[in-house]
Image: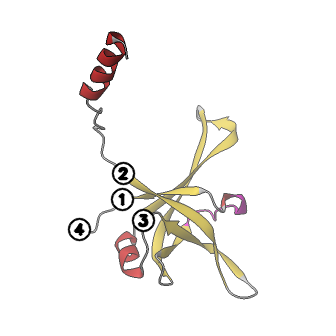
Amino acid sequence: MSQEQKKRKQQKKNKKKKQNKTPRLHVDGIFMGYRRGLTTQKTGTSLIKIIGVGTRKESEWYLGKKVAYVYNASRHHNGSNVRTIWGKITSSHGNSGIVRAKFKRNLPAIAMGKKVRVMLYPSNI
């Protein structure tokens, strides 16, 4: 290795990572589908798998938190084509950490498998 390469390597080691000054306000989740029975599905209630939550007890902390589905629309409205559908986590679903959520407008079926943002507010601490 040449002198210059060693110098660059040393500079990379010495550089500190830039710390993020804004706090994290959401956790990612995945919209899995609608609440359903054997022959019917209830599109008014969505099932969401929160990343990092594996048990019913862990999912209870998220009850009452806001959920946002953010997507890009084809037309601009108010200077942007980004839209959001807001909802709220209502209860746990099963024992594997999945939660139920109700949205102001039901989520479209094309959103299944896509990410949603589970906001860490309102806090109940």
Q: Are marks 1 and 2 in contact (CB under 8 Å)?
A: yes
The secondary element bearing badge 1 is classed as: loop
Where, by quadrant of the figure, is residue 7 drawn?
Answer: top left
On residue 25, the disc is 2
Residue at the spot x=52%, y=68% of the render? 49
Q: Position of residue 77 (x, y in %)?
A: 63, 37
In what quadrant of the picture does the C terminus appear? bottom left
Q: Circle 3 — which element?
A: loop
Point out the tag, 4 or 2, that comes first from the N-terminus: 2
Return the residue at label 1.
Answer: 120
Task: Tell me: residue 83, above or below residue 63.
Answer: above
Name the residue: 61% across, 57% down. Answer: 114
**Residue of label 3:** 52
Q: CA distance from mark 1 to mark 2?
A: 6 Å
Marks 1 and 3 sit apart, C-alpha to C-alpha, by 14 Å
Q: Is residue 4 above or below residue 122?
A: above
User: Is residue 42 highlighted in magenta?
Assistant: no
Please report contact status of discs 1 and 3: CB closer than 8 Å, yes or no: no
Residue on which the image places disc 4: 125
Looking at the rendering, which quadrant does residue 13 occupy? top left
Q: Earlier in the sequence, mark 1 or mark 2?
A: 2
Q: In the image, what residue occupies the spot 46% across and 76% down?
A: 97
Segment colored magenta: 103-110
Give the number of the mark in front: 1 or 3.
3
Q: Earlier in the sequence, mark 3 or mark 4?
A: 3
